[in-house]
């Protein structure tokens, strides 16, 4: 069964929810800061993620955790471009996670095939024209401001409705700037200017986001809202980020079943299994539906 998640112009077609593995080439990311900061280790990690089932790999050189300060452009380029180049040369489908047009441009030259900008082009006015000129897909994420103060912006009357409205306006700006709408992916921005309840509401109502008409990327991996859920009670300490992978895989299965185009995760194997099971269940449901129609048409029930 073909769905919106299957069609992003410029990328392969996956017959299920795709799995995007994360390579943070940073010393300060919230879940694995410093672990893959060396170029050689980052490349090896990216290849390992593909071996574990990742369909594409997202390479980023700037932490966007709450409270994080920005890295300068030269340092971001130094971190990201060599990793993108080596992974792309090895045949990996590479996404670049950046808010800077210059980094996106050089990463695309090095072989990146998707630009994942958490600001949806708002952080750098040159980003949308650069992506449009390169004619590559672009992730439009819901974003209300920079990491340093985004928690102060987590105020909503209707989180799902407001996220849909704000994402719609960001999509319109991207298209007006020259990006082909068939190359746009949307992301609800879990954890960005959102509390745990907001994130859970967005996952529970993905159908309203899919009404925007574009494939949906869900990036729940190891995030704070999962820690709050797993803590099990008000005031209880959440488990560390790296102990939230089973919960991440649970979300991957849920959103895959709801038609997400891709999930972005740090630990790939469990989510790769989860999306494949979700697809098998979807096929079984489709087959059962066809059998019911045939039985009704032939009068055998």
Image (cartoon, rainbow, N blue to C red):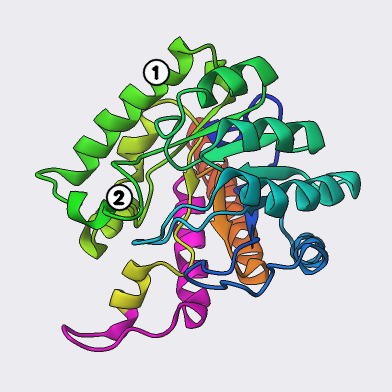
- In the rendered structure, the answer to whether residue 221 lies left or right of residue 147 reads right
Is disc 2 in contact with disc 1, using a CB cutoff of under 8 Å? no
- Let me know if residue 247 is in the magenta part: yes
Q: Which residue is mark 2?
A: 202
Residue 284 picture location, percent across and down: 59, 52
Q: Nearer the viewer, residue 227 or 278?
A: 227
- Looking at marks 2 and 1 on the same chain, the residue that comes earlier in the sequence is marked by 1
Give me the C-alpha separation between circle 2 and circle 1: 23 Å
Task: Name the residue at 20% across, 36% down.
Answer: 161
Quadrant holding the N terminus: top right
Which dot marks residue 11? none
From this viewpoint, is residue 116 visible?
yes
Residue 208 picture location, percent across and down: 30, 37
From this viewpoint, is residue 56 visible?
no
Q: Secondary structure at mark 1?
A: helix
Residue 95 picture location, percent across and down: 67, 43
Task: Name the residue at 30% across, 76% down.
Answer: 229
Q: Nearer the viewer, residue 221 or 278?
A: 221
- Let me know if residue 140 is in the magenta part: no
Q: Main secondary structure of the magenta part?
A: helix
Task: Name the residue at 57% across, 73% down.
Answer: 32
- In the rendered structure, the answer to whether residue 75 lies left or right of residue 249 reads right
Q: Which residue is mark 1?
A: 173
Q: Is residue 186 above or below residue 20?
A: above
Q: Secondary structure at mark 2?
A: helix
Span highlighted in magenta in the image: 230-258
> As drawn, which residue projects farthest toward the bottom?
236
Q: Nearer the viewer, residue 193 or 105?
A: 105
């Amino acid at each position: 069964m073909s769905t919106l998640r299957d069609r992003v112009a410029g990328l392969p077609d996956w017959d299920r929810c795709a799995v995007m593995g994360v390579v943070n080439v940073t010393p300060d990311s919230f879940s694995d800061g410093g672990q893959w900061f060396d170029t050689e280790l980052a490349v090896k990690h990216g290849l390992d993620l593909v071996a574990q089932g990742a369909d594409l790999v997202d390479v980023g050189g700037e932490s966007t955790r709450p409270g994080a300060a920005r890295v300068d452009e030269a340092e971001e380029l130094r971190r990201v471009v060599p990793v993108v180049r080596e992974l792309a040369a090895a045949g990996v489908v590479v996404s670049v996670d950046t808010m800077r047009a210059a980094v996106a441009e050089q990463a695309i030259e090095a072989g990146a095939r998707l630009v994942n900008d958490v600001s949806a082009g708002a952080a750098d006015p040159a980003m949308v024209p650069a992506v449009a000129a390169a004619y590559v897909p672009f992730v439009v994420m819901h974003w209300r401001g920079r990491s340093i103060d985004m928690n102060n912006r987590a105020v909503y009357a209707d989180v799902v409705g407001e996220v849909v409205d704000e994402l719609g306006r960001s999509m319109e700006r991207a298209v007006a700037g020259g990006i082909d709408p068939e190359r746009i992916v949307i992301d609800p921005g879990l954890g960005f200017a959102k509390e745990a309840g907001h994130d859970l509401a967005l996952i529970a109502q993905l159908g309203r986001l899919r009404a925007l008409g574009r494939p949906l990327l869900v990036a729940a991996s190891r995030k704070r809202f999962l820690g709050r859920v797993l803590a099990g009670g008000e005031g209880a300490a959440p488990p560390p980020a790296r102990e939230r992978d089973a919960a991440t895989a649970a979300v991957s299965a849920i959103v895959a079943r709801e038609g997400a185009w891709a999930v972005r995760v740090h630990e790939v194997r469990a989510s790769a299994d989860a999306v494949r099971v979700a697809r098998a269940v979807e096929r079984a449901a489709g087959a059962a539906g066809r059998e019911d129609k045939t039985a009704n048409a032939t009068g055998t029930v």
